[in-house]
Image (cartoon, rainbow, N blue to C red):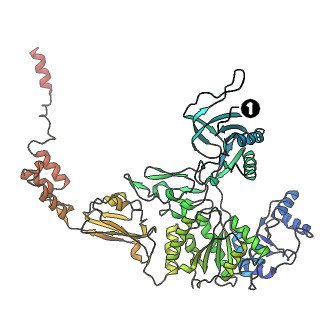
Amino acid sequence: MDKSLILCNCSETFELDAEALSKTTGLACSKVHSGLCTTQTEQAAKAIADGNAIFCCGQEQAFFEELAAELEAPTPAFLDLRDRAGWSDDAGSKLPKMSALVAEAVLPAAATKTVDVISEGLCLIIGASDIAFAAADQLKDYLSVSVLLTDDAAPIDARDYDVLRGHLKSAKGALGQFEVRIDALKQPSLAGRGERIWSAPRNGARSQCDIILDLSGATPLFPAPEKREGYLRADPGSIGAVSNAILQASHLVGTFEKPLYVKLEPMLCAHSRAEQIGCSNCLDNCPTGAITPNGDHVTIDPMVCAGCGTCSALCPSGAITYDAPPVDATMRRVQTLAQAFLAAGGTAPRLLVLNSYGSEMVKLAARHGRGLPADVIPLEVDALNAFGHAEILCALAAGFAKVSVLVAPTTERDPLQKEVDLAQAIATPDAVDVIDTQDPDALSDSLFEAAHPAPIDTPVRPMGTRRQVTRMAAKALNPEADSLSLPDDAPYGAVLVDTDSCTLCLSCVSLCPSGALGDNPDLPQLRFQEDACLQCGLCHNVCPEDAISYEPRLNLEDSALEQVVLNEEEPFACIECGALFGVKSTIERITEQLAGKHSMFAKPEAARMIQMCDNCRVNAQFHSENNPFQGAERPRPRTTDDYLSKRRDH
């Protein structure tokens, strides 16, 4: 059954054209109501009971969900047309923008992969005695509490929670699985008359807990502490912050669903080969430390991962991809918005990428300010940092004239700026920008006043991996260009070989993780396919002659998809059988350096072996005098006559 749009103009504060919207979206539209959440609740209830309704109101979502529960009907879908399109000072038509938002809203939602995290309420409180004991007294009825004192307070007679004293040496893990190590651990005596005393200190004590409430005011136990689930940290001097942390801790008991944010394909990882380090983008930029080396690849702790998406955007090979939702789902949303906007008669749309924090800013700007321009379409994503250069270029190729990313307080700015710089180099600098403000009015002003280039004449909708999308979008955005210069740290480019230094040892070929470098089994050649090169640095790091360097660029010619010869030499013919092997210049140079000059090759017959192929060399070695592989003379096989003669002798 097709979806139907339930329209409401919120007390006639903005215009809605039901007939036009139905025509551009292909969906049935209700009449335009004015008070579905107040005077027209009966009509809202009827729409919910009929099913397959999309309420075009975001503000009163909770009300309509409660109404559905009372009716024992399925919860309807919701779409915010008022704040994102209707409430705007722009006099232009809002129909193309509304049509685009509706088209995106009816896309099937990607399934979220999760894993259960169990917290039994074991809480470790760290801090000075005055603040830690007060927090323990508030939490003792909800959690199983242990207090680790950081000052010199005397032990108290506490029966509702454990009291310890010591130095927290290290901590790892996340909600439901923290592991801590404590040095100089002291415990209060359990028997004896009079004041309690501390036991003798001991180092290396280990324990586990589900929640850590850090009220010490010291350095955080984890990087990006605000993103470590189960780790609550508050300034002990702020009563409000401490109270808020205590309240949060009291609710961290039970089974929670932890999203699996990213997907890892270890065989695509270009981190390391043969103990040579190559790409470390994800390791260098993961804010939580969830990514660690694991031999030639990396490993990701899903319990520590906070889902910022930085690793997915920066990974050159696609070994790490965002999976909540998948990358292709985000691409599809972007392309649907552009296609629907243009199909509804709009021109030169702009895309505003934001997260839930940015959506709240848009709501405030709409209610109290100028709102958004009619050509600015907001796209809310869970992870801003996962919206990298490939997604930006996908949007520009789909028909958007400009892409703006509205950062939030928790956004990792450096990795995002790196992706924006790369997108600007491939497109144009004025087609991509970052908006860094927490003022809704400033946001509106920047969007109303911003200039932007003309969009692409013929939109395209590339799909595939992020690298494939980037290449196809770049070709569409730069139809006259053969190659584009990129920043030094770009994941696209050429390998340059100093042919005077290269000996064609092919060490680079054996270590190349993407197969960009290859050899020719019949001739001494070093081949290269530029489209596959990750610019990871492994071939440069392993080259014994330091003959390899890089040129960051995006080659848009078809030659980038083919193997080209970077270096080749004449092969050497075996002096025994004539088979081609090795490099002629190398064999001649080795012969010149060793023949008659090294003890192993002092004799002419030994020196000749340098110029033989593998088979002939083994054969010559086997038949040479003083053959090191030669053993004692083989014994003569015993026959029946031998056994019979032995019997006769006895």
> For residue 164, what is the image quadrant?
top right
Task: Tell me the crowding category of disc 1: few under 14, some 14 to 19, or many 20 or more residues within 10 angstroms, Cα based.
Answer: few
Quarter of the image with the C terminus is top left
Q: Position of residue 361 (x, y in %)?
A: 72, 69
Name the one closer to the observer, 407 or 218: 218
Residue 376 coordinates in the image, percent (x, y): 68, 78
Judged left or right of residue 254, residue 12 is: right
Task: Check the image and report above or below for 389 versus 110.
Answer: below
- Using residue 337 as the reference point, say whether residue 88 is left or right of it: right
Tag 1: amino acid? Ala
* Residue 551 placement: quadrant: bottom left
The N terminus is located in which quarter?
Answer: bottom right
Residue in view at x 34 percent, y 63 percent:
518
Going 79% across and 71% down the picture, which residue do you hit? 56
Of 218 and 627, nearer the camera is: 218
Which residue is denoted by mark 1 in the rendering? 158
Along the line of sight, the residue nearer the viewer: 380 or 471? 380
- Total number of numbered labels? 1
57 left or right, relative to 512 = right
Residue 394: image location, x then y, percent: 57, 73
Q: In the image, is residue 617 above or below residue 100? A: above
Q: Secondary structure at mark 1?
A: loop
Question: Which residue ends up furthest to the left in the rendered image?
Answer: 604
Q: Is residue 68 visible?
A: yes
Tell me where residue 250 appears, x and y as whole percent: 75, 45
> Which residue is at a point 76% across and 38% down the rendered structure image?
140
Q: Nearer the viewer, residue 476 or 435?
A: 435
